[in-house]
Amino acid sequence: MKNYMKTLLIFGLLTLVVACKKTDPEPESDKNVPSQNEINKDIKLDSLQQVKKDSVPELKEEITKKDIHKIKEGIAYVYWPMKVSDSLSKKFFKTYSKSEIYAIAALNRVDSDHIKSRDTIIVPKDLKSNFLDYSPFPNQMDIISEIPKIIVFSYPIQAYAVYEKGNLIKWGPTNMGKKTAQTPRGLFFTNWKGRKVKSTSNDEWILNWNFNISNSGGVGFHQYALPGYPASHSCLRLLDADAQFLYNWAEQWVLQDKNTVKVKGTPVIIYGEYSFGKKGIWNDLVKNPEVTTVSVSQLNNIIEPHMAEILKQQEIRK
């Protein structure tokens, strides 16, 4: 009897165990729960790789998009978005007067008609009433104190300076020869002039207030569109008012006969190299207000090699 009861008890326990396995199936959630190694792997993937690949570039792109629609301030100048921000472009023309816009355009080496075409322009924080106060050239040059008149054109900063007996009386923007048709450097003298002449490169191009400086080379300074970079066929483009001023201010040559020059005109020095393919250096004025400044010593080094010839021609003119 004891053995029978013992056998019955063991059989009952076995039946209970089998029943428990049948009535308590594996939960569905357990099938989808990853192992701890898989969890750690996913955490690394999400926290490092995904952030590195997705979040950071999106964030940078978002910041960039926001930045190009903002006015960025420097010490003395600000970047003002034009083409990339219609609202800021409209605000610009409402904020400044016509005379102020003319000066700002000149600082960007463009005429007023082309200021809208620039992606971004530089705008001085302190608008001056006298444009001469923005000059990158020295106010006085002792080396030319005995020279009645001289003009200096700088290729690097696309600007010119006018001196009378060493005193700066005027400066302004210029757009000189493009890379494939660069303006020649060196010492020249103004010779003949024409109020309205046709270009030798294209007779459809009308050159107002043209003053030739290289008769054989067909190079001169005159009024023409200023897009904000070297774009001419070797000539020196000027704003209309500037071209008119130089047209009336500079001296013409004096001819002894048709083929002989008796007296040369006003000396003109063209110097330096332009970084073609890059934005003009004046765009960096926001970062560095002195980036376009030409020092007295720098200009002395430009002028000094030409002084003997300048003085010689001056004596002949006397």
Image (tube, grey):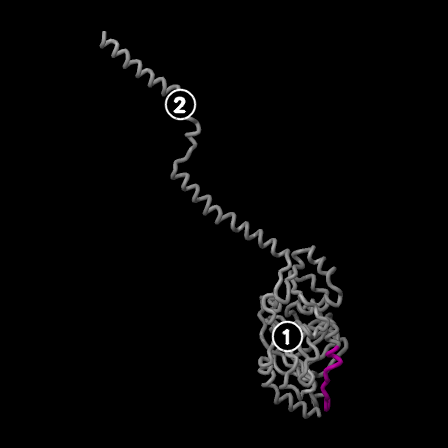
Q: Would residue 218 be visible to someone looking at this image?
A: no
Image x and y of residue 87, in percent = 69, 55
Q: Which residue is mark 2?
A: 25
Q: Amino acid at mark 2?
A: Pro
Mark 2: give few (<14), some (14-19) or many (20+) Cα within 10 Å.
few
142 or 155: nearer the eye? Answer: 142
Q: Secondary structure at mark 1?
A: loop
267 or 17: nearer the eye? Answer: 17
Q: Which residue is mark 1?
A: 136
Q: Which residues are magenta?
A: 245-257
Q: Is residue 255 above or below residue 7?
A: below
Image x and y of residue 237, in percent = 69, 73
Q: Is residue 127 above or below residue 50?
A: below
Q: Which residue sits at x=39%, y=37%? A: 36
Q: Secondary structure at mark 2?
A: loop
Q: Quadrant of residue 206?
A: bottom right
